[in-house]
Amino acid sequence: MAEVRRFADAGELGRTLAAEIVALRPRLLGCPGGRSLLTTYRALPDLPETTAVMMDEYVPVPPPDAHHSCRGFAERELPVRGVWTPDPDDAGSYDERIAAAGGIDVFLLASGASDGHVAFLPPGSPRDGRTSVVRLAASTRRDNLVTFPAFRSIADVPEHGVTVGLATIASARRLRLVLHGPDKREATARLLSYDAFDPEWPASIVHDHDDAQILLA
């Protein structure tokens, strides 16, 4: 079962997690886009030895200057040497690339507010899944309206994405899942109700790892 750590606010959480990342000096840092890790990313100094391994991207792949581009988000927010994103035309090569580079040292995670999705993985995703193109659950697409407010309606949210799998995440040496804000309270309660992985709440993968923490504010 994952260790739970609590902080006074998102700023304290972000500064603490950023300091831990700096101390670890990861070569590969698994990263989500979106809001949850922003206080962490913005507390990081330059990481010239670190490559950000982004966990997902919309399909069709948007240009980097699109508001919902994962690559664009990473290039704006992450002070790292380089950025990797999965290729929907050769999704399986992403896990091979990660393994060839020595594996992910720390995978930072966030949880969907309404369905516990992690990356673009919907409820029911297989524990042994690797990087692939998936159809986004309707609940995930509704959550993305909050994550990316420039989407005017759910009809604007792409229906597909390329995403790491639960096995990709679980193979990292460390997992750090961040939850904060009033819109994540129900998701937090649901996650803390588990003591083991449940495929109906993908973020619970943290409970199936030897070095995992849930950071709350």
Image (cartoon, helix red, strand yellow):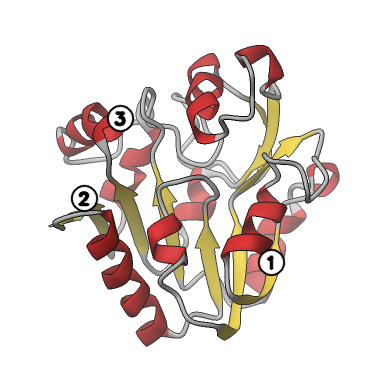
Q: Is residue 88 above or below residue 73?
A: above
* Residue that label 1 marks: 83
Q: What residue is shown at x 25% (from left), y 58% (from top)?
A: 213
Q: Amino acid at mark 3?
A: Asp
**What is the secondary structure assignment of the residue under circle 3?**
helix
Q: Position of residue 108 (x, y in %)?
A: 43, 58
Discs 3, 2 touching: Cβ within 8 Å: no
Earlier residue among tags 1 and 3: 1
Residue 12 in picture, x, y percent from top left: 23, 64
The location of residue 2, given as percent across then percent down, is 21, 53
- What residue sits right under mark 2 in the picture? 216
Q: Where is mark 3, residue-wise?
A: 183
Tell me which label, 3 or 2, sits earlier in the chain. Answer: 3
**Looking at the image, is 192 positioned above or below residue 106?**
above
Whole-angstrom CA distance, mark 1 to mark 3, is 29 Å
The residues tagged by marks 3 and 2 sit, at their Cα atoms, a distance apart of: 13 Å
Q: Residue at x 63, y 30 (%)?
A: 150
**Quick one: SS at disc 1?**
strand
Residue 95: mark in rendering: none
Amino acid type, residue under disc 2 in the picture: Leu
